[in-house]
């Protein structure tokens, strides 16, 4: 059999090198995207912990002055929401640091400082060499002065992960460099043209390329396994953060219930009247049912949900929820934007639970003879749902963010809205409560139409 021409052989080798280089570039880009997603998840977890401590930090800063600033910074470190805490002015200039300056540097842009001062929480991840910090910015007003609290949290797990990712990226970069050099050598013109290619040289080249490809696949598989392991660890930490946030509330509810049970039990011990004894026993049973409800809802809130995604019509879901929640209530409802099917991707069962809480809250606020309005619209790949009521509006002490165990309902637990917010966050969405004019509250939900982004 005749040997192939040298030009065809060189072209085949170059094409093979190009294919291998393409896989290396894709692996390199995948590693970069994975690192960014990991940083975003870490920032979100740290932000949730910082927001849970916001009320206590606001109370510490309320008096104003250096003593108040020092107290707030020290409190943030003591609560475990920061390794280093800094107090900044409204323009982002550092006023005070405790216990020291963070080992990373970050300056707020003017527009970022304005958003933080307006009440928005900002979280980012910054690295300086091998050291990484998750920085969270919270805006406050204390002593008549606008302040920004920068909470720097050490993330050693992320530092280890990023160190390994850098090594993997360097390996991919070295492989790409070797491929480029090999392509240059193949394409380089030679003065003497051999008539027959050396089989030994070609075999050695193929073996080297095979080893390089196997090494790249091995490193990619290892990178993917480590990424999943890190994501699982972050999810576990998020669950622990939620559990810590709820501990004070759950202890308060259980302690009140146990106090009532003990009181009725003492009455039961002293009474000789059968009717009184039966009444005390019923009261004890009712308190036990209440405690069981508290524990069940607590478990629902901290449970790690797994999304079962599908496409469904949000209009049908909202109509179903409204019909069920308003049954037997003297509350009227107005629908807008639901005449045509509006498809969204998500976990239909979980989202139904979220909207149940929002519709129930709106109906409770509207009261007998009141009215709620349900409106849905889609624009720029996002779904917006508004559930409005004509009730009394938000109370003056209502927190800016939805917080567990905060409720204005008699006998309420304050877990309905936090559970709805948790489900919406799992879908990459958001929940905001706003006062309406002239009265009432608007619950605004935003969801990506295409479902959560991995």
Image (cartoon, grey):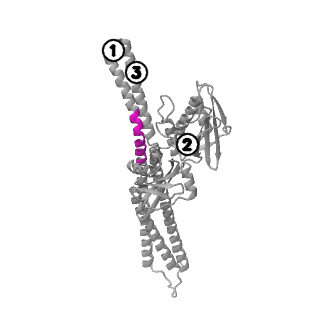
The crowd level at tag 2 (other Cα within 10 Å; few <14, some 14-19, many 20+) is: many
Q: Which residue is located at x 50 percent, y 59 percent?
A: 93
Question: Which sits earlier in the primary sequence, circle 2 or circle 1?
Answer: 1
Please tell me whether residue 250 belongs to the stretch shown in magenta. yes
Contact (Cβ within 8 Å) of mark 3 with mark 1:
no
Lateral position of residue 132 relative to residue 386, left or right: left
In this view, the residue in front, 192 or 173, is 173
In this view, the residue in front, 350 or 175, is 350
Residue 350 visible in image: yes
Please tell me whether residue 27 belongs to the stretch shown in magenta. no
- Asked if 282 appears above or below 321 in the picture, the reply is above
- Which residues lie in the magenta part? 237-252
In this view, the residue in front, 26 or 413, is 413
Where is residue 174, by image quadrant?
bottom left
| Pointer 1 residue | 271
Question: Which sits earlier in the primary sequence, circle 3 or circle 2?
Answer: 3
Query: Where residue 283 is drawn, which disc sits there?
Result: 3
Q: Position of residue 380 (x, y in %)?
A: 64, 50
Q: CA distance from mark 3 to mark 2?
A: 37 Å
- Asked if 446 appears above or below 97 in the picture, the reply is above
Q: In the structure shown, which secondary structural element does the residue marked by tag 2 occupy?
A: strand
Query: Where residue 431 is drawn, which disc sits there?
Result: 2
Query: Where residue 353 is drawn, which disc sits there?
Result: none
Q: In the structure shown, which secondary structural element does the residue marked by tag 3 occupy?
A: helix
Q: Position of residue 402 (x, y in %)?
A: 51, 41
Q: Which residue is located at x 49 percent, y 82 percent?
A: 196
Q: Position of residue 25 (x, y in %)?
A: 51, 66
Contact (Cβ within 8 Å) of mark 3 with mark 2:
no
Q: In the structure shown, which secondary structural element does the residue marked by tag 1 occupy?
A: loop
Which is closer to the viewer, label 3 or label 1? 1
Q: Position of residue 7 (x, y in %)?
A: 55, 79
């Amino acid at each position: 059999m005749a040997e192939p021409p040298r030009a065809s052989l060189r072209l085949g080798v170059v094409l093979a090198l190009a294919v291998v280089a393409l896989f290396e570039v894709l692996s390199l880009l995948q590693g970069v995207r994975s690192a960014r997603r990991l940083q975003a998840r870490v920032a979100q977890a740290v932000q949730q912990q910082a927001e849970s401590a916001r009320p206590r930090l606001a109370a510490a800063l309320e008096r104003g002055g250096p003593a108040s600033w020092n107290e707030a910074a020290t409190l943030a470190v003591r609560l475990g929401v920061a390794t280093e805490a800094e107090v900044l002015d409204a323009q982002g200039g550092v006023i005070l640091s405790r216990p020291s300056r963070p080992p990373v540097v970050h300056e707020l842009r003017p527009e970022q400082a304005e958003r933080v001062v307006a009440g928005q929480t900002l979280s980012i991840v910054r690295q300086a060499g091998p050291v990484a910090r998750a920085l969270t910015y919270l805006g406050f007003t204390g002593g008549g002065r606008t302040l920004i609290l920068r909470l720097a949290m050490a993330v050693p797990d992320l530092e280890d992960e990023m160190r390994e990712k850098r090594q993997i990226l360097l390996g991919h970069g070295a492989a790409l460099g070797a491929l480029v050099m090999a392509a240059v050598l193949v394409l380089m013109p030679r003065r003497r043209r051999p008539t027959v290619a050396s089989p030994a040289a070609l075999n050695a080249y193929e073996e080297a390329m095979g080893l390089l490809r196997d090494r790249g696949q091995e490193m990619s598989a290892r990178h993917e396994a480590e990424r999943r392991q890190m994501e699982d660890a972050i999810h576990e930490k998020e669950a622990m953060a939620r559990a810590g946030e709820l501990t004070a509330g759950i202890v308060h509810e259980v302690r009140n219930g146990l106090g009532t049970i003990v009181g009725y039990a003492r009455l039961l011990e002293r009474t000789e009247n059968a009717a009184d004894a039966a009444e005390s026993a019923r009261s004890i049973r009712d308190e036990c049912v209440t405690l069981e409800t508290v524990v069940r809802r607590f478990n629902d809130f901290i449970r790690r949900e797994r999304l079962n995604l599908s496409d469904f019509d949000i209009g049908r879901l909202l109509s179903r929820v409204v019909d069920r929640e308003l049954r037997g209530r003297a509350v009227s409802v107005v629908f807008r934007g639901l005449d045509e099917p509006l498809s969204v991707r998500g976990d239909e069962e979980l989202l139904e639970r979220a909207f149940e809480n929002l519709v129930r809250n709106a109906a409770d606020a509207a009261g007998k003879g009141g009215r709620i309005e349900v409106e849905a619209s889609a624009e720029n790949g996002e779904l917006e749902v508004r559930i409005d009521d004509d009730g009394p509006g938000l109370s003056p002490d209502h927190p800016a963010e939805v917080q567990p165990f905060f409720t204005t309902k008699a006998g309420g637990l304050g877990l309905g809205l936090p559970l709805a917010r948790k489900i919406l966050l799992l879908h990459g969405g958001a929940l905001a409560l706003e006062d309406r004019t002239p009265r009432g509250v608007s619950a605004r939900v935003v969801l990506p139409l295409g479902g959560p982004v991995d």
